[in-house]
Amino acid sequence: MSKKTDFLIIGSGIAGLSYALKVAPYGKVCMITKANEDESNTKYAQGGIAAVMYSPDSYKKHIEDTLIAGDGICDEDIVNMVITESTERINELIEWGAKFDKTTSGNYDLAKEGGHSEHRILHHKDNTGFEIERALLAAVHTHPNIEILDHHFAIDVLTQHHLDIEVNSRTKDIECYGAYVLNLKKNTIETILSKTILMATGGAGNVYATTTNPYIATGDGVAMVYRAKGKIDGMEFYQFHPTSLYNPSENPSFLISEAVRGFGGILKTIDGNEFMQKYDVRKSLAPRDIVARAIDNEMKSRGDDYVYLDCRHLDKEGLIKHFPNIYQKCLSIGINMTTDFIPVLPAAHYMCGGIKVDKKGKSSINRLYAIGECSSTGLHGANRLASNSLLEAIVFAHHAAMDGIETFEKVNFCSSIPNWNAEGTAHPEEMVLLIQTLREVQAIMTNYVGIVRSNIRLQRAFDRLEILYKENEALYLKTTISPKLCELRNLINVAYIIIKQARERKESRGLHYTINYSKT
Ligand code: FAD
Ligand code: SIN
């Protein structure tokens, strides 16, 4: 069975939804998403979205903060573009219906997070992402040109490979024609052909054992594009958020927003001593790579499972008003954040690298765009500045949409893509194989490719992963497709790329910290 559309969007987070709203007036939009339509990293974003709104803040300051956090390898053109367009794009988000908190004077209530020299984070209490996702979905639902197919899982993008034309190099002219999609409601594999294809599949936090990301974050977009021989870069820079709630029985880990430290929360070891002054003059509000590494070091050298975030000295009412969800969550496990320490530890949080794209969100594969967390635009360099990712998604949605609108009518559908061939496959007999392999991948990544790395750890990770890769590919070829099997395959691909790119970077920079090379 095959379907045709002008714009195929894979993913319904902030990136996919805002792009959909932009292209919908010009053509037919088909958005597929693998779970409920609102399930995404976007939905869980807490702190907010960074933008320059009022003086004394300025584009110059936000640009400087972004470049400093990125540790010398941001693409300056891209940083300039994203930051100088921030106000315009935020206003558009507000027009689409997103509501951000205001002060009594009627101005937006801007918060501060690590690495920011000014208060510039627009937020909706401590569940900004939920509000953005709500508003965008509501706007999308009213558009007659947009069809959302939930519980539709993209398996692979379609290229010349599916026409039996060999494409050997990542630099040759590769064309994308659409995607093979598993319709989970009917259990059928469908072919969706499209004039333009947008990858907006988000991050891959589940490649690590502890993550703030929901279960959908399995790096599917990066893995699909990698298999289609598209360019992927920056994957060695996986960002760990310094403060996820220590609650061993919970997966994913609940985030304690950086905005809590922006509000005055202080990191302490479990004997109650401050430690961040040993690592950075900005103390608890230093950029994330520095804070996460400092916590990791304190935990490992002291043999502790967590550190504390201390908010007991802060204005109680203000704390509860700004962070009602975090307050309630802590209470639910017996911690009153106004009177008790909050136990926290770092967790995998954000994929700074991804599908390499240009200023217009175009990947190295023709007709295939990538935006949001699955893309690598050059904005984040070696370390993302807090709350710059939601901003990046809306700015690139705009540029990708402008380019797609201009070009899609000149493109013809590819008529010779064969239907999915499931011959020779059987139903999976042993779920235990998938579960155990996933645990092994996560253990390898956490122990050898986490916050601190070394040549020997990376070599070991590479060797161990190769065994899992071979076992899983063999299983994939003879088993009926299921989301769990595809996600595992994708996570193994993503783990492989992270390790490969980490081994290629012979220095410590930003989030890639290795004991074999000092910082340059
Ligand atoms: P997502 O929002 O993750 O959406 C991806 C979509 O793709 C989902 O709908 C998913 O189901 C779908 N999908 C994936 N694979 C497939 C497939 N194979 N087939 C079909 N559909 C698929 N950033 C900030 O700027 N500020 C913050 O305050 C902030 N807080 C955060 C807090 C948490 C707990 C987390 C996890 C992240 C936070 N981030 C924050 C990061 C930010 O939320 C994400 O980077 C951003 O929302 C990513 O948006 P996206 O649209 O690219 O991807
Ligand atoms: C947070 O609220 O700390 C998350 C912000 C982000 O990841 O940008």
Image (cartoon, rainbow, N blue to C red):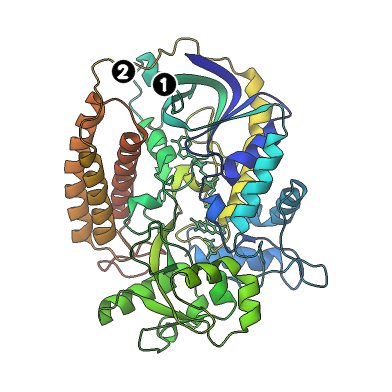
**In this picture, is 265 found above or below 54?**
below
User: Which residue position holds label 2?
Assistant: 422
Along the polypeptide, which appears first: circle 1 or circle 2? 1
The residue drawn where x is 17% and y is 54% is 460
**In this picture, is 78 found above or below 103?**
above
The residue drawn where x is 40% and y is 89% is 273
Is label 2 within 8 A of ligand 1 (CB to nearest ligand atom)?
A: no
Q: CA distance from mark 1 to mark 2?
A: 9 Å
| Front in this rendered view, residue 216 or 173 | 216
| Front in this rendered view, residue 59 or 470 | 470
Q: Secondary structure at mark 2?
A: loop
Within-10-Å neighbours for mark 2: few <14, some 14–19, many 20+: few
Q: Amino acid under label 2?
A: Ala
In the displayed structure image, the side of residue 120 where residue 71 appears, left or right = left
Q: Amino acid under label 1?
A: Ile
Query: Residue 280, percent across and down?
Result: 45, 81
User: Which residue position holds label 1?
Assistant: 189
Q: Image quadrant for the C terminus? A: bottom left
Query: Residue 171, percent across and down?
Result: 41, 32
In the displayed structure image, the side of residue 412 where residue 341 appears, left or right = left
**In this picture, is 173 found above or below 449?**
above
In the displayed structure image, the side of residue 5 where residue 212 appears, left or right = left
